[in-house]
Image: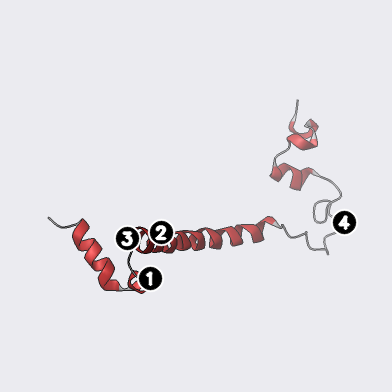
Amino acid sequence: MSDNNKPADKLTRVQNRTDTPGKAGTDGKNDSQKPARRKTARWRIVIRWMIPLFLVLALLGGMIVGYVVIGKQSLSEVFEWKTWQHVIDLVFAP
């Protein structure tokens, strides 16, 4: 079975874009029209920003839960550098 005789659901994205007649920009008749923008490009940008944001929020949430809830300390001390310098010294002490 050749590549051109495949059913439409079996084609790859590239083949669907280039082999499907009637779409703007593929048949040569609609050269003045711009091809339709892909919606997935926006989602990729959003996801690329959401993942680091969620990682930072998880880090802050873990620091707060670990230090305030489990450690029974005050919330204001979570964001002080001397607190985390002390933790680093305890972890990496010889």
Name which quarter of the figure residue 88 lies in.
bottom left
Q: Quadrant of the C terminus?
A: bottom left
Name the mark on residue 71: 3
N-terminal of the pair, mark 3 or mark 4, is 4
Q: Helix, strand or loop at disc 3?
A: loop
Q: Which of the two discs, 1 and 4, sits closer to the camera?
A: 1
Residue 62, numbered circle: 2
Secondary structure type for disc 1: helix
Q: Which mark is residue 29?
A: 4
To which residue does mark 1 refer? 75
Task: Give percent across and percent down for residue 52.
Answer: 49, 61
Which of pointers 2 and 4 lies earlier in the amino acid sequence? 4
**Kind of element beneath mark 4:** loop
Which sits earlier in the primary sequence, circle 2 or circle 3? 2
Q: What's under tag 2, amino acid-wise? A: Gly
Q: Is residue 10 above or below residue 51?
A: above
Q: Residue at x 61, y 57 (%)?
A: 44
Structural distance between the alpha carbons of marks 2 and 1: 12 Å
- Residue nearest the viewer, comparing 1 with 8: 8
Q: Residues within 10 Å of mark 2 (few under 14, many from 20)?
A: few
